[in-house]
Image (spheres, helix red, strand yellow):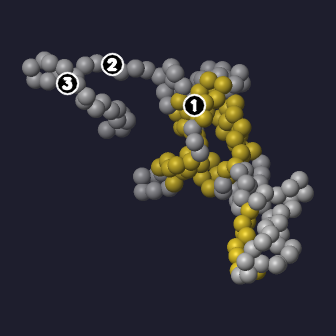
Amino acid sequence: TWTDSDGYYSLPDLAAGQYTVEATKPGYGKDARTPVKAGDTQVNLRMEKQGGILVTVVDKRGKPVKSYRLEVKRWFEDATGGSYGRGMPAMDVRDPDGQKEIGGLEAGDWAVQITSPKFAKTYSDKFLVAEGSQASLEVKVVMNDGGTIEGFVYNETGKPVVGATIETLDNTY
């Protein structure tokens, strides 16, 4: 069932027993009450709006990047300093100011990944969405010009190697 314009809900025709009543909605933290008996009234739930961000993507000259793919990812501290985890589904952004507002972020550490043609894939600095935060944080991402590496892979007799996996490694070797 869903709440009406006053936030009211009713769960009729329940069998006798104990239940957990839970409320969820994108952009809000969930709330639950347990145990609740069939016939209980005034089972009120409180949902807090989750945090949001305003992402602004610019090139190194400060001009807006008007079209890009944005991924919001969880940030986890680990022995190497940190790593990225799953977050929200990727989204394509087209905006003349290079901006995108995103809500519904749970409390915790996050980062955004931006990809766009002619630019190198870039991550934002990590940022913290505080518990109960309703304010939008400003996240600015400055893209670096991208480059292309091209070549061929041959075997020892000079014939092409079909299906070879090509990877890049960072230059901290």
Note whether residue 135 is visible: yes
Which is more N-terminal, label 2 or label 3? 2
At 59% from the left edge and 23% from the top edge, which residue is drawn? 60
Q: Position of residue 53 (x, y in %)?
A: 70, 42
At 25% from the left edge and 19% from the top edge, which residue is drawn? 152
User: SS for tag 1?
Assistant: strand
Seen in the picture, residue 165 relative to 88 is either above or below; the reply is: above
Which is more N-terminal, label 2 or label 1? 1
Quadrant of the image containing the N terminus: bottom right
Which of the numbered marks, if any, corresponds to residue 168?
A: none
Observer-nearest residue: 69 or 33? Answer: 33
Seen in the picture, residue 28 relative to 91 is either above or below; the reply is: below
Where does label 2 land, which residue?
Answer: 150
Which is more N-terminal, label 1 or label 3? 1
At 72% from the left edge and 58% from the top edge, which residue is drawn? 24
Callout 1 amino acid: Arg
User: SS for tag 2?
Assistant: loop
